[in-house]
Amino acid sequence: MGLDARAGAIRGMSALAWIAIALLVAVNALYVAAEFASVAVSRSRIAALAGKGNARARRLLAIVEDGARLDEYIAACQIGITFTSLVAGALAQAAITPVLTPLVGRLAGISQVAAFSAATAIVLLGMTTAQVVLGELLPKSLALQFPERVALATLAPTRWSVILYRPAIALLNGSAFVLLKSFGIEPGGHRHVHSPEEIEFLLAASRKGGMLEPEAHRRLRRGLQLSSRTVRQLMVPRGELLAIDATTPAEEILEILLSSPYNTLPVYQGSLDRIVGAVSLKDVASAFAQSGRIPSLIEIVRPIPFVPENLSADRLVRFFQEQKSTKAIVVDEFGGVEGIVSVQDVLEELFGEIAEEGEEEETATVERLEDGRVRLPGSMALDEAEPHVGVRWKGSAATVAGHVLEAFGRMPAEGETLEIGGVEVTVERTSPKTVLSVLVRPKAPEEDEVEGEWPSP
């Protein structure tokens, strides 16, 4: 008898009410999908579709590129979600609870009042579950997995909703803006803006997901960090600078240029702090072809520009373009020569070592030893040592050798050991002027260090 009564009650429910509830849940799902897709959609992909003549893509692109319109679009979705959820819940309580109450009373053997409360709770729990699963989680997952498809599919109904809800959007957004301003917060709208740290995270996530090759990821990451690199970090330091004295006899000029690994050499008078220009083998050959002799360097020297050591790498590129030059002398704040920098140094920062024609490849490389230590060349850029030492060394030096010299405060002897930033460093080889290589024992990563963690705001 209980089963017959339950079946009769279910058949007695309004079919129209069930259809209306299902439609409301579906509309709620549409608004949720439209909201998430509009935020997650790739502008570049939508722009590409718009460029191919897709009318919907053109209309969507106009929305996502305008912060105010995107804010209005998302507000319409939020109003739609709220409205459909409330109406679906109220309709369910009005249509289902009265029918469910006597069933609960008979099955549980409780009073009518208690049965009504229990039926209300059952309907509330059922509608909440349906709304969360069918109306929110499912459309959200689809929107995040296929943002372009979902954004285009939901564009038309959401645009009509914007028109329908415009008075309510203006009232509610205006109220929200007033509240924000009372807290000293300027409303910024919904914009697809990422900090450099967040872009690095996205690049790392793309590489981990197989969308980027390791080499492409490395180049993009280096390109992103180019503006934070200075000329001092890119230059060939003074100790390694090859230059030619302006008083060099003519018979030696050709020999020096031919034996040099570089096409162009700076020319100085007396000391490196008095560089007067630069000369190349081509200049000497051209002068010899015209006059039948090798002239003095002062006669054929060409101007070479000077740049401050703290100039950023991206501004250095613009400097080279403006000066129509490929090399520049690096000077400190007092005008002392610190080294030389070239376009090739910038390219190597992005793409790795690029050997000039006739230049021998350097043999100084990173090498992991059997005892767990790592051999690092002293010429390695300081920021490139982090993957090998386990920590990020910070200091004014541009190279590992400079950082070690700063830590010791003097020229160390071969075999000396010092802890730098929690890393054991042993000087392996030195020259009279600098440290050629070191042996480091990498620091084990901390347990709470998570690779690819989203940067804190």
Image (cartoon, helix red, strand yellow):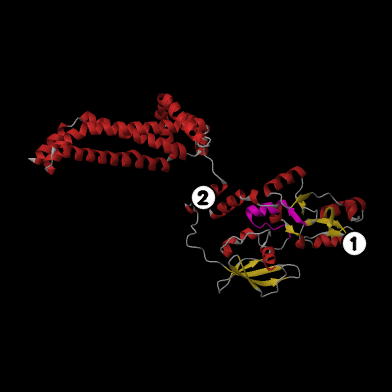
Looking at the image, residue 434 sits to the left or right of residue 8; the answer is: right
The residue nearer to you, when weighing 421 against 236, is: 421
Q: Earlier in the sequence, mark 2 or mark 1?
A: 1
Q: Which image quarter holds the N terminus?
A: top left
Inspect the magenta stretch and tell me whether residue 421 lies in it: no
Residue 366 is situated, as x and y percent measured from the top left of the image, at 61, 66
Q: Which residue is mark 2?
A: 456
User: With respect to residue 456, does 87 lie above or below?
Assistant: above
Residue at left offset 65%, top offset 54%:
349
The answer to whether residue 199 is visible is: yes
Cα distance in 3D space between marks 2 and 1: 63 Å
On the picture, is 98 further left or further right than 242?
left
Tell which of 52 and 346 is nearer to you: 346
Q: Position of residue 265 (x, y in %)?
A: 80, 56
Quadrant for residue 259, please give it: bottom right
Residue 54 visible (yes or no): no
Magenta range is 338-358
Q: Residue at x 19, y 30 (%)?
A: 14
> Circle 2: is it few (<14), some (14-19), or many (20+) Cα within 10 Å?
few
Residue under numbered circle 1: 251
Q: Amino acid at mark 2?
A: Ser
Is residue 349 inside the magenta stretch?
yes
Question: Does 111 sit above or below residue 447?
Answer: above
Residue at 29% across / 42% down in the picture? 129
Q: Secondary structure at mark 2?
A: loop
